[in-house]
Amino acid sequence: MTTFRTLSGTATYAGIFGNSELVHLLKRSLFGVKQADLLAFQGKSLITVVDTLLTPAATPAPPVNNYNDSNYTDANVAAGQTWVNAPYTDGATDSRRTTSLKAWWLGRMLNQQQSIEEKMVLFLHNHFSTQTATIGDARYEYKHNALLRQYALGNFKQLVKQITLDPAMLRYLNGYQNVKTSPNENYGRELQELFTIGKGPNSKYTEDDVKTVAKVLTGYNVNAATISSAFDATRHDTTNKQFSAFYGNKLITSKVNAAGATELDDMLDMIFATNECALYICRRLYRFFVYYIIDDATEANVIAPLATIFRNNNYEIKPVLKALLTSDHFFDRLNSGCMIKSPIDFHVGVCRDFGIVFPADTDYVNAYYMWDYIRTQSAIIAQNIGDPPNVSGWAAYYQEPEYHELWINTDTLPKRNQFTDTMVANGYTRNGKKIGIDVIAYTSTLPNPADPNALVSDVLAQLYAVTVSQQVKDFLKAILLSSQLSDHYWSDAWNAYKSLPTDAINKGTVIMRLTAFYKYIMDLSEYQLS
Amino acid sequence: MRRRDFLRAAGTAGVMMPALVNGYAFKAFGASPLMSALTAAPTETDHVLVIIQMTGGNDGLNMVIPIDQYANLANARANIIIPQNKILALDGTSMTGLHPAMTGLQSLYNDGKLKVVQSVGYPQPNFSHFRATDIWLTGADSNVVLNTGWAGRYLSQEYTNYPIGYPNTIMPDPLAIQIGSTVSPAMQGPSVNMGLAISDPNNFYNLINGIQDTAPNTPAGKELTYIRQVSQQTQEYGAVIKAAAAKVTKQATYPTNNTLADQLKIVARLIAGGLKTRVYMVSIGSFDTHAAQVNNGATETGTHANLLQKTSDAVKAFMDDMKGLGTSKRVMGMTFSEFGRRIKSNASAGTDHGAAAPMFLFGDYIQSGVLGTSPAIGTTVGVNDNIPMQYDFRSVYASVLKEWFCVSPDILNNVMLNNFQELPVIKDTAPCVSTNSDILNAQAGKNLINNYPNPFNGSTTINFESQGGHALIQVFDSQGHLVRTLIDAVQEKGSHKVTFENQGYVPGPYYARLQNGSLQQVRTMMLVR
C-alpha cells in the first residue's frame, strides 16, 4: 500500500492559531520574521492576518542614481534622481544602473511591508525568468520588475498577456525577432513549457503547437526610444493557426491588419481553457510556499482544489493564495519547517529576523551600498536576483529529485555560516557605515531577556521553524551562562548592563555571550529551515 | 575466514559458486569489478574524467565543420556560415575541420590527443533545455525520467556504502567534484549526491561541532538530515582538498577572463595534488545562440566564436598544465551540450534548438581521429530539419566507463541500465593504473546493509544493522519508484534480516534503502532472469 506524506487538504484550518502557527505563516509569506510584525499580529485571527498579508503594498519610488563617483558621472541623471526614464548612453552606465536596480530591489525586500507581495515578486521573477545580462538595458528591466509588482496579487492571465508584450521579455526570448518569414519559436516554446502549461503528466501539447504559437506571436516589435512594444501587421503570419487535440483542435482563424494582434487573446483563452494550466501554476506556487514533494494525495487534495479555485476566479491570484494560506494542509504539522531557505530568503531573513538597521533611503549612497552587499551574498551562493541561471529559473524550483536541497551543498553552506558569523560578530563596514546584528538591541526586544530560559525559548520560537529538545536548549543556555550552573549569572549580567548601559565592561560581558549564543543558533542546520 | 576475504579469494581463483549467483558461473566474473562490488571494494584505477558541460545547446555544425558538405551547409545557413578558407584543417582528413577560434584543440588533434565523435544524440530528441539537460545528465531514454545521474550511478557501484564510513583510508578524498556552487544532477546517486561542490579549494570554512537532536521522521527532519550531511562533508573533505591544493605551487599559464580556464586550473591543481577523486565537472555557457551567433560580415567572429575560443584555449592550457605537472596520463576529458542546433539558421543570425551534435574527447590515451561521417546536409534544408544521430551519447559514456575506468560489462549494465554499443575511445595500451599509485584494492566504508545472494532471482535476504530506534527498509527500482517497504518499525540495536521476494519484477538493478535515525544507506541488488 502506498503511504502518503499527509492527507490534509484545503478545508479551512480551524485549529489553534498560536505563536508557532503565526511564525510559520510569516516565515513562508515574508522574508524572515521581524519581532515588530510578530507583536503586531499576535492575538489576531488567522483570516485577519492572511487578509493583511494579501494586501498589495504601496508602489515604491523607483531606483535612483547612487552610482556617481570620483571616476564617473551620469550626464543625464543627477545624483539621487531616478534613471528609469533617462536615455541609454553606454554599457558602462547601464552596468551601474543594473546594479542600482538590483540593490533597490533587495532594499524593497528588506523594507517589505506586512504583505506577501515581495515574495510573490520573487516567485514571478523565477517563473517568468529573465536575465539582465541578456536584456542589456536596465530601463527595460525596471519596467519588467514594475510589471511583476503590479500583478503580484492581481490577475495571472492578464499578467501572461502583459509579459508576452513586455519589451524586456520580447528582447530576452527573441520575440521581437519572430516574424512571418522566419519564425523564432523561443518564446512560443517557453510560454507553454514554463509559463502556462508546464510539463506535468497530462501536458500533451505538441512540437507543432510550439511552432503554431510562434506564428500567432509573429509581428511584435520593440520601440527602443519609448521602451514599448507594438504590433506590426506586415510582419505577422496571416495563415490560419491550427492547434493539436490537446487544445481541442482549436483553429485560430487568421485576422488581417491590426486585428491580427487579437489572435493573442484567442490563444491565451485557449491556453487558459486547459485544465493543465491552473494545475501547473498551483504546483509552482505549492513548491514555492509549502514544500517540493507533491505526491498523489497532495495532487488530489490540494493542487486540484486550488486549480479549481484559480479557474473559477478567472485566474485571480489572491483567492488561490488565500485558500492555500488558510488551509488545513498549510498548517499541517508535517508542512512546517521543511522548506530550505533560498539564499534570498536566508540573507534577507537574517536581516529582518534581527532587525538589522540599514542606512535610511535618503542616505541613498550608503543604503545602496549595503543593499547591494546583501544581494551579492545571495548571488555568490547561486541566487542572483535579476539573473537566474536561464529561462527555466532556479533549478531548486524544478529539478527533481533534489529541488530545494540544491541550495545547500559543501560550497554554499559554509558561505551561509560565514555570512551569519560576520553579521553577528564584526558586521560589514563600508564607507564608514556598518551593518550588523546589534545583539543587545535585538535581545532587548524580547519579553524577558533577563531569564535565560525564557530568552532561549523566545529566541528559538522566532528564529527556528522546528522545535528542539530540552537538551539543545540547555546547551544554548550554557553558552549564555559560560557553563556556570546557576541561571542567575546571566540574569545578573543582563541586569547589570541594563542598570548602567554605558559601563563598557557590563556591556562587553553580555555582548560576548550573546554573540556566541546567536552565532551558534544560526550555525546549526535548523536555522536553514523555514 | 571472513566472508569478505573468502569472496575475494574465491574470485581470484575463479571458483565456481553457483549457489551464490544462482546459476551464473562465477568464473565468468573472475576478479572482476562485480567481485569488487560484492566485496565493497572500488576498482583499482587512478584515472580521472573531466566533464565539460557546454550549457545552452551548442551549434555543432559551426564547431566541427563538415567540409565535404560545405556547399549545402552554406546554402542552409548563408548568414552564419564560416568562410571555407578560415576553417582549421585537421591532419589526415579533408572532410572535417574546426571553427577558426579553436586553434588549441586543433593542435591537440594534430598531436593525436583529441577525438571527435560525430552526431551524438539519442532517439526522439527533446528540444527543451532542461529536459534535454536531464536526459544527458541522467542517461535516460527520451521518455523516461530517472532520479539518478549516470556518474552518480557509476560511483555508487564503485563505492557502495557512500557516504557512510567515508572518508576512509582507501578513499580519503571526494568521489567527484563540481567546480562551482551547485552539484550537478549527473552525480546524483540512488541515495545521496556523490559529488562535492567547491569554488575555491583554499576557502573552506569550518563548521561547528556540537550537540544536536535526532532528526524527526517528518519532511522537516528529512531536510535537516540532508543539511547536516552536507555540513559533515564540508568538514571531512575541507582539509584534504586544501592539502592537495597546497602541494601544487606552480602551474602553467592559463588564459584570463575565461571562467572555464579558471575552473580547469583548480581541477588541475587538485589532480596534481594527489586527490583520488575520479570525476570532475566544470561548465561554460551560454551557447543558446538564437540571435547574433556571429558578427555580420565576419562570421568567424562573434558570440559563438568567443565561447568556442574560451573552450578551446582552456582545454589546451589544462592539458599543457597536466603535462607539465606529470599527470597528463591519468586524465581524459569530454565535452557535451544538451543539444545541437538547427541546420538552417534563422533571420536573426542565430540558430534554434536542434538535435545531435559532435562531442570532443581528449587526453594522452584517447584514440584520436574523427569517429563517424560528416552529417549529410541536403540541397534543400527545411527550417525544422535536424541532424540525425549516429551515436547514442550513452554509448560514449559506456565506452568511457569500460575502457577508461575498466568497468566490467555486468557493472556497466547497472550503471547505464541498458546495453549500449561500445565505441573505440581509449587506446588499447592504456592500463587501468597509468602511474604508480598507492590505491589499494580493499573494502571501503561502513556497511550497514547488504544482501545475499546477489545477483538473485527468486528471493534475497537483506541483512542490516540498526543503531536502535525506528528503521525503514524500502526497495526502489532504477527509476526511483518504491517497489516494497519491507520494514517500517522500531528495531533494536543489532543485526536484523528480512527477505525480499521477487514477485514477478522486471530484471535489473533494485536499490534497498535503509533509513535508521539520521543514517541512510543504499544497497544495489541485481535481479536476474
Image (cartoon, coloured by chain):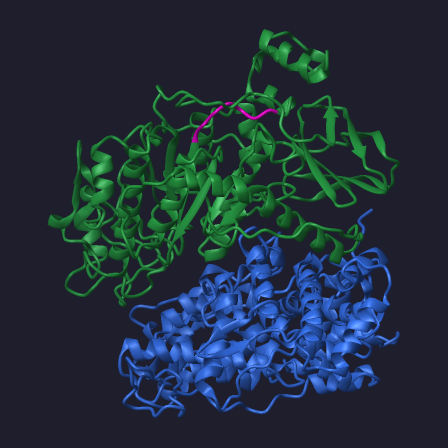
Q: Residue furthest left?
A: B85
Task: Tell me where the magenta segment starts and ends, as one range.
Answer: B41-47
Determine the residue positioned at 56% across, 33% down.
B172
Determine the residue positioned at 46% across, 89% down.
A62
Chain B is which colour? green
Image spot of residue B400 (x, y percent): 43, 31
Question: In the image, is residue A291 above or below residue B283?
Answer: below
Determine the residue positioned at 45% across, 51% down.
B200
Q: Nearer the viewer, residue B28 or B520?
A: B520
Left or right, residue A217 beside residue B443: left
The image quarter in which residue A183 lies: bottom left
Q: Nearer the viewer, residue B245 or B91?
A: B245
Left or right, residue A234 beside residue B184: left
Chain A is which colour? blue
User: Is residue A60 in view?
Assistant: yes
Is B297 contained in the magenta span? Answer: no
Question: In the image, is residue B53 above or below residue A59?
Answer: above
